[in-house]
Amino acid sequence: MQHATGPWVTPPELPDDPKRLCLVELHFARDNETRYYAMRYLRGNWQFQDRLKLSPVQRVVRWAYILSPDMRTEEGA
């Protein structure tokens, strides 16, 4: 994953570009598991690609911008 994403960032810092996809590590309180999703931060909310928002049982642990192939080349990946 290190070549597919930018550096990991933890809340309360949030993405400043709503158009870019982020890889988000989510913790699910209901089953005490962590999963990864591609999401965007739009209008003050994390949103899945189908535009659903986080539920109260989901918490963002950390996030990283997903890099396009062009960006990976520029960074020497």
Image (spheres, rainbow, N blue to C red):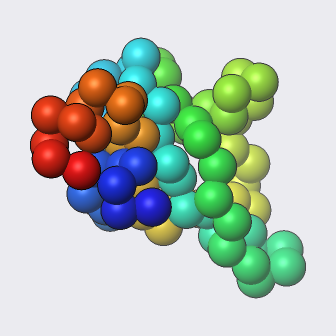
Q: Residue furthest right?
A: 31
Choose top left, top right, bottom left or bottom right for residue 3: bottom left
Which residue shows up at 60% across the image and 41% down it? 38
Q: Is residue 11 visible?
A: no
Residue 35, how many percent across, how many down? 69, 66
> Residue 67 or 50: which is nearer the viewer?
67
On screen, residue 14 versus residue 66, left or right, reads: left
Which residue shows up at 15% across the image and 47% down it? 76
Vertical position of residue 14 compared to residue 40: above or below: below
Q: Residue furthest bottom?
A: 32
Vertical position of residue 15 compared to residue 56: above or below: above
Residue 31, how many percent across, how many down? 85, 79
Q: Quadrant of the N terminus?
A: bottom left
Residue 68, how many percent across, how many down? 38, 29
On screen, residue 39 versus residue 64, left or right, reads: right
Q: Is residue 30 visible?
A: yes
Residue 6, how many percent across, how many down? 28, 50
